[in-house]
Image (spheres, rainbow, N blue to C red):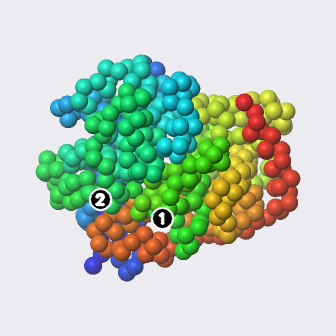
């Protein structure tokens, strides 16, 4: 008999409700509801539109019920962001979005009281201004009234699960992105919390991916006309779910979860927090089955996505296949950027910034759409090569094949360029990696799939994989020397 689970995946621009059906040793996915996930600016602060998103989740539940029903629900989002719940159990305000600039320079301010080396030695988390620790330090230092009293912090998927069940829990993979957990003890670090003006009581009990938040509340179930099914804490950090879906049959594999961010990593049993890992600013985040996602956050397709949004604002019609074709036909290695340079992080006119960076670094300034897109794609491929080199040196893992998963693999030139730049075979699929990973964790929890190893075999059988081989690796190696110099640009 088929088992059906409902997955919600909230990405950088949209959210989807997807029914995953498990039957005959395969998982099939069907999108039943899609909705926008766009932040809202009020008085210069960037917020999640969280109550509207909850309404969209309820619409997704209704759509799934009408499609044939479901046996459980799982929600995943990106990490670091959170809502604050007051003493009465009410949300105090809309959660602030990580791209808000309130944390600008907060890392520098925190390091005056908590040295960077000490922070990394405890948490193993990549230093990024968006991290929860810097958001909380801002609140503690400049808006302490917002966290004063008997309040609770819930990360976004935990918050949405609370809305559905009335139960407060903190799922481990999403909490592990915060910079507040001891990576070895797998629990909140009380010394860090004290330094930033918090205490452990602010957090709900930690649960592992695969455990239940609770059952859909009676009020919600009655309002939506559906059964009171369990709400399962899948690997609620979207990258953790995507890594579950990597269809590798070997343990020592490398992956890129390719989307707005490119998450480049490997799966380990224990965190690695030595000086080499810290110098490379590599993160140790929690994964399913007590694994560690040893990975690097790279400013992935955000640069391309914001470029397309700017062109749309200017009245251009965006056709991705046309842009990809133009990029492939453009002259190679003429213009490159460092995708992680701070100037490419904010919203705004991305093509203008790309041109400014190229002019500033004495390169050919890309003019055509194809030249700009090729610049982005080649630059990402070189960042992958750079990151692979760092990780291979630290872990000792060889790269026999690089797995690329997620929506970004629909841009085939990126996959092709990644193979050539890294001089390795690239295997792509599944596209809906996050939803697939979300689903199989629910199915393991329900007793339908035995374990992670079996889940990955099932995902491989359920997915059309593509393979890319390196082309002209010598030319890529030569151009890479030019790229390396750009990483030094401040």
> For residue 484, which quarter of the picture?
top right
Whether residue 318 appears in this view of the structure is: no
Relative placement, left or right, of 409 versus 4 is right
Q: Say above or below: 189 vs 7.
A: above
**In which quadrant will I find the C terminus?**
top right
Residue 467 screen position, x and y as percent: 65, 70
Real-space Cα distance between discs 1 and 2?
Answer: 18 Å
Q: Say above or below: 282 vs 146.
A: below
Residue 36 screen position, x and y as percent: 42, 42
Which residue shows up at 34% across the image and 56% down it?
208
Which residue shows up at 41% across the image and 50% down it?
185
Whether residue 108 appears in this view of the structure is: yes
Closer-to-camera residue (254/352): 254
**In which quadrant will I find the N terminus?**
bottom left
> For residue 453, which quarter of the picture?
bottom left
Residue that label 2 marks = 211
From the image, state whether disc 1 or disc 2 is nearer to you.
2
Which residue shows up at 42% across the image and 60% down it?
290
Closer-to-camera residue (82/30): 82
Closer-to-camera residue (67/448): 448
Q: Which mark is residue 245?
A: 1
| Circle nearer the N terminus (1, 2) | 2
Relative placement, left or right, of 66 versus 490 is left
Residue 226 screen position, x and y as percent: 18, 57
As drawn, the residue found furthest toward the bottom would be: 24
Q: Residues within 10 Å of mark 2 (few under 14, many from 20)?
A: some
């Amino acid at each position: 008999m088929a088992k059906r689970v409902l997955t919600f995946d909230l990405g950088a621009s949209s959210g989807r409700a997807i029914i995953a059906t498990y039957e005959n040793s395969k998982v099939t996915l069907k999108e039943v509801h899609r909705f926008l996930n766009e932040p809202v600016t009020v008085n210069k602060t960037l917020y999640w539109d969280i109550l509207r998103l909850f309404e969209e989740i309820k619409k997704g539940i209704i759509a799934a019920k009408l499609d044939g029903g479901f046996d459980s629900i799982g929600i995943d989002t990106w990490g670091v962001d959170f809502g604050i719940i007051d003493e009465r159990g009410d949300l105090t305000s809309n959660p602030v979005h990580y791209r808000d600039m309130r944390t600008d320079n907060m890392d520098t301010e925190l390091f005056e009281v908590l040295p960077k080396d000490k922070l990394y030695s405890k948490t193993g988390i990549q230093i990024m201004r968006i991290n929860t620790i810097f958001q909380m330090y801002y609140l503690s230092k400049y808006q302490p009234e917002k966290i004063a009293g008997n309040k609770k912090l819930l990360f976004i998927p935990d918050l949405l699960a609370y809305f559905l069940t009335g139960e407060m829990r903190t799922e481990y993979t999403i909490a592990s992105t915060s910079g507040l957990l001891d990576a070895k003890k797998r629990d909140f670090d009380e010394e860090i919390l004290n330094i930033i003006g918090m205490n452990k009581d602010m957090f709900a009990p930690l649960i592992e991916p695969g455990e239940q938040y609770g059952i859909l509340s009676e009020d919600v179930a009655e309002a939506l006309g559906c059964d009171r099914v369990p709400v399962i804490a899948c690997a609620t950090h979207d990258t953790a779910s995507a890594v579950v879906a990597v269809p590798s049959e070997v343990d020592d594999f490398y992956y890129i979860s390719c989307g707005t961010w490119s998450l480049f990593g490997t799966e380990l049993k224990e965190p690695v927090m030595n000086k080499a890992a810290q110098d490379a600013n590599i993160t140790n985040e929690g994964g399913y089955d007590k694994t560690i996602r040893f990975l690097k956050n790279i400013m992935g397709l955000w640069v391309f996505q914001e470029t397309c949004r700017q062109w749309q604002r200017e009245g251009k019609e965006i056709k991705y296949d046309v842009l990809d074709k133009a990029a492939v036909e453009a002259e190679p290695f003429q213009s490159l950027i460092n995708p992680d340079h701070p100037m490419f992080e904010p919203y705004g006119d991305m093509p203008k910034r790309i041109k400014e960076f190229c002019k500033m670094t004495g390169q050919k300034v890309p003019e055509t759409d194809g030249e700009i897109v090729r610049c982005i794609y080649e630059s990402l491929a070189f960042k992958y090569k750079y990151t692979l080199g760092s990780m291979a040196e630290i872990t000792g893992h060889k790269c026999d094949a690089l797995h690329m998963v997620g929506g970004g693999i629909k841009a085939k030139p990126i996959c092709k360029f990644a193979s050539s730049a890294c001089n390795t075979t690239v295997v792509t699929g599944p596209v809906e990696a996050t939803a697939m990973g979300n689903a199989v964790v629910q199915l393991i929890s329900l007793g339908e799939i035995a374990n992670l190893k079996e889940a990955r075999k099932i995902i491989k059988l359920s997915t059309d994989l593509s393979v890319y081989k390196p082309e002209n690796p010598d030319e890529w190696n030569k151009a890479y020397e030019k790229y390396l110099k750009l990483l030094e640009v401040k």
